[in-house]
């Protein structure tokens, strides 16, 4: 499946070539020559489909999941209204913003994750290979080892055996397949997302990410005149947030019953009061598109602030864990050594 960067480049390049008078099938053929092999194959198939009489939106629909429903529905609107160049331009902006948001999340979490990996690696290497000899000397002296030393010594000796590496590989492989199986089940993903939304600290980050993506996708559809019900559903699907996808059904029902947009969104229970108030202002002033775009900017800023705060909290936490591990190892080593020295005095 093509990556976010390839998708952003695809829409940007397609928009530029289409505005320059290049036909769709020719543009797709040119885009089929690129480094991302997955995207190249998609472009090649789409070029063949367009040559055989399919529209661009139909070709995109035949190449899910490379393209989402929102992608080809918006392109379909552009084909029907004659504004395909505008739609492609807006989709390129949307994908670039979406990729920028994803990169912010990844970059903010990379450093704490790196520190945690170093911490785990130190725990695996330090006891068995650097302290194994010291523990053997202490054990051969006949001194009675404290409980903490026995635990660290037993762990160090076990980590030097093949059994440990077999168990480690089994845990990693089993965890990978179990996680993949759980993630592919909609009910499991929904439960995990609910847990993340309710988690202190993490919930604010997850909600800000979902709201910023929803508002950005929704503003594009409002701008091109997508029907309100379809716009809400497609915007929710674009967030990849199963909770929002499920909760938006309440908004859709309320909207069909004649409620205002603000009241319909409130019926979902997902959107905070600030989001709802700005939507209400946009409805009353007739500038819903501009207001929703402003909402997206606000929550993108909130996402940046939340990421900075989370990173600032994670770094000392990881350092604290590393210090605790070193402290346990030092105490486990020094206590029996002091007992040995005292026996000679």
Image (cartoon, rainbow, N blue to C red):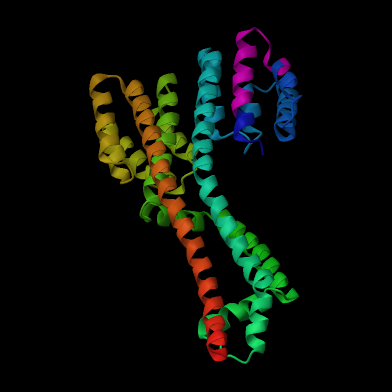
Compared across the picture, whether 129 is left or right of 202 comes to: right
Looking at this rendering, what residue extends furthest in the top direction?
21
The answer to which of 320 and 93 lies nearer the viewer is 320
Q: Position of residue 250 (x, y in %)?
A: 34, 44
Q: Position of residue 5 (x, y in %)?
A: 61, 31
Q: Is residue 243 above or below residue 93?
A: below
Compared across the picture, whether 310 is left or right of 111 comes to: left
Q: Position of residue 202 (x, y in %)?
A: 40, 51
Q: Position of residue 323 (x, y in %)?
A: 49, 62
Looking at this rendering, what residue extends furthest in the front direction?
345
- The residue lying at 61 percent from left, 80 percent from top is 153
Q: Quadrant of the C terminus?
A: bottom right
- The residue lying at 47 percent from left, 39 percent from top is 239
- The residue lying at 47 percent from left, 35 percent from top is 234
The answer to which of 311 and 253 lies nearer the viewer is 311
The answer to which of 69 and 162 lies nearer the viewer is 162
Part of the protein shown in magenta: 8-26
Q: Quadrant of the N terminus?
A: top right
Q: Is residue 257 visible?
A: no
State which quadrant residue 280 falls in. Answer: top left
Is 15 in the magenta?
yes
The answer to which of 70 and 326 lies nearer the viewer is 326
Is 177 in the magenta?
no
Q: Is residue 60 visible?
A: yes
Q: Is residue 154 above or below residue 197?
A: below
Compared across the picture, whether 130 is left or right of 202 comes to: right
Secondary structure that dominates the magenta span: helix
State which quadrant residue 251 falls in. Answer: top left
- The residue lying at 51 percent from left, 72 percent from top is 328
């Amino acid at each position: 499946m093509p990556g976010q960067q390839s998708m952003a480049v695809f829409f940007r390049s397609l928009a530029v070539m289409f505005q320059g008078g290049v036909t769709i099938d020719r543009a797709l053929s040119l885009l089929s020559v690129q480094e991302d092999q997955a995207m190249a194959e998609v472009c090649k198939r789409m070029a063949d489909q367009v040559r055989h009489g399919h529209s661009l939106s139909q070709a995109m629909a035949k190449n899910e999941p490379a393209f989402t429903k929102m992608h080809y529905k918006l392109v379909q609107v552009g084909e029907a209204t004659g504004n395909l160049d505008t739609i492609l331009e807006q989709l390129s902006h949307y994908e670039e913003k979406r990729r920028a948001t994803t990169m912010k999340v990844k970059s903010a979490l990379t450093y704490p994750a790196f520190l945690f990996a170093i911490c785990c690696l130190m725990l695996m290497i330090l006891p068995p290979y650097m302290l194994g000899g010291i523990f053997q000397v202490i054990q051969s002296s006949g001194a009675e080892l404290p409980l903490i030393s026995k635990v660290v010594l037993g762990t160090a000796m076990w980590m030097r055996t093949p059994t440990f590496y077999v168990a480690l590989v089994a845990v990693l492989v089993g965890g990978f397949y179990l996680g993949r199986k759980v993630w592919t089940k909609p009910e499991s993903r929904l439960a995990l997302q609910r847990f993340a939304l309710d988690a202190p600290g993490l919930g604010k980050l997850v909600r800000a990410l979902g709201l910023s993506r929803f508002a950005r996708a929704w503003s594009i559809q409002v701008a091109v005149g997508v029907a309100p019900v379809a716009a809400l559903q497609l915007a929710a699907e674009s967030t990849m947030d199963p909770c929002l996808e499920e909760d938006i059904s309440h908004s859709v029902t309320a909207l069909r019953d004649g409620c205002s947009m603000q009241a319909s969104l409130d019926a979902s229970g997902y959107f905070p009061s600030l989001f709802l108030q700005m939507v209400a202002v946009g409805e009353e002033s007739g500038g819903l598109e501009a207001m929703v775009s402003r909402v997206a900017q606000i929550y993108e800023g909130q996402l940046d602030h939340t990421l900075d705060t989370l990173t600032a909290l994670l770094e000392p936490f990881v350092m604290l864990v590393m210090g605790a591990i070193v402290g346990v190892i030092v105490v486990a080593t020094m206590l029996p050594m002091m007992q040995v020295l005292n026996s000679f005095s």
